[in-house]
Amino acid sequence: MLKYRNTALAAALLACLGLAATGLQAQRAGDDRRSDEARPAPTPPKPAASPGRQPRGAAAAPQAEQEATRRQSEEKLRRAIEEEERQKAAEAGRAALDAGRARSEAEEKRRLAKLEQEKEAKRQRALREAQCVIKPVMTNDEIAKCSQAYR
């Protein structure tokens, strides 16, 4: 049997399997009178060829029908599980993409902050250099300003 991740989905499909395999759907159709017009009329059972004997394949026919119903239900369940896994993978891919975007945005912010800091440092250095005027005779304060400006 297949491994199921979504237990609610598995339970619903297994319930359908059980109803289809045991023939309870026919009984339920008679009990449930909500929409008799929408349902096809049940087909009456075919009479046996002879009253004492059943045809050779008659016993195998219900089993084959049950087996086919079971296989169809399992196939539907497998498809539903695969679809759910595809959706989870797509969601994980979107989450990874969002995380990548957030990371790249953070890197962009850091880069812009660094660029702004470098601009400010250049502006302050240019301001210090403008204040420094080299003369033949300078005071100690003027020499300190110029040495700091040209570091």
Image: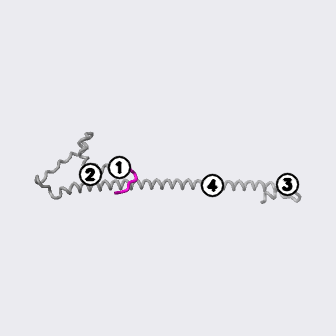
Task: Give the mark, 1 or 2, whose residue is nearer the N terminus.
Answer: 1
Identify the element where label 4 is drawn.
Answer: helix
Residue 141 is marked as 3
Counting residues from the start of the chain, the first of labels 1 and 4 encountered is 1
Range drawn in magenta: 1-9
Residue beneath the point at 26% across and 51% down: 21
Q: Position of residue 135 (x, y in %)?
A: 86, 58
Q: Looking at the magenta stretch, what is its main secondary structure?
A: loop
Which mark is nearer the camera, 3 or 2? 2
Q: Which residue is mark 1?
A: 11
Labels 2 & 4 near each other (Cβ < 8 A) = no
If the image is split into quadrants, where does the C terminus sit? bottom right
The mark found on residue 110 in the picture is: 4
In this image, 63 relative to 112: left or right? left
Callout 2 crowding tier (Cα within 10 Å): few <14, some 14–19, many ≥20:
some
Q: Is residue 117 left or right of residue 81?
A: right
